Amino acid sequence: MARPYPREFRDDVVRVARNREDGVTIEQIAADFGVHPMTLRKWIRQADIDDGAIPGKTTNEPAELRELRRRNRLLEQENEVLRRAAAYACRPVAARARLRRARPSRGWARQLRRSRPA
């Protein structure tokens, strides 16, 4: 598994690679910092994308996309709850009355209290 490098370290290595003198290769800079040359090339490419020099997904986009998807799921759940509540509220009165009659009511408890001797 790849070793995670701190953000500051990556930024420093990319800055050194961008400001290198003539004749100094990416491979030499990568060896000096102890990273693989392809890793350094990827960091430089990602830094160019983040700076807007080349098109592509910025570093923050995947996290932002995850957050937006999570928010979308939450809103869809809230919408479903409201849709069900609206469907219940829009039923005809007779249908709601049937549901009330199907459940034991307080009238049942009152009848028990009345039947008990005081």
Image (cartoon, rainbow, N blue to C red):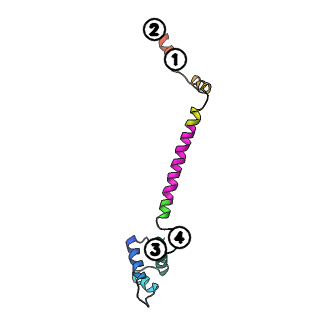
Span colored in magenta = 65-84
Q: Are marks 4 and 2 in contact (CB under 8 Å)?
A: no
Q: Nearer the viewer, mark 4 or mark 2?
A: 4
**Sequence-wise first label, 4 or 2:** 4
Secondary structure category for the residue under label 2 = loop
Residue at the bottom extreme, as displayed: 23
**Sequence-wise first label, 4 or 3:** 3
Q: Which numbered tag is attached to residue 47? A: 3
How much space separates mark 4 and mark 1, taking CA atoms? Answer: 69 Å
Q: Are marks 4 and 3 in contact (CB under 8 Å)?
A: no
Q: Nearer the viewer, residue 3 or 10?
A: 10
Label 3 neighbourhood size at 10 Å, few (<14), some (14-19), many (20+)? some
Label 1 neighbourhood size at 10 Å, few (<14), some (14-19), many (20+)? few
How much space separates mark 3 and mark 2, taking CA atoms? Answer: 86 Å
Residue that label 1 marks? 107
Tell me which amino acid carries mark 1: Gly
Residue that label 2 marks? 117
Q: Nearer the viewer, mark 4 or mark 1?
A: 4
Would residue 9 be found to the left or right of residue 105 on screen?
left
How much space separates mark 4 and mark 3, taking CA atoms? Answer: 11 Å
Tell me which amino acid carries mark 2: Pro
Residue that label 4 marks? 56
How much space separates mark 1 and mark 2, taking CA atoms? Answer: 18 Å
**Sequence-wise first label, 4 or 1:** 4
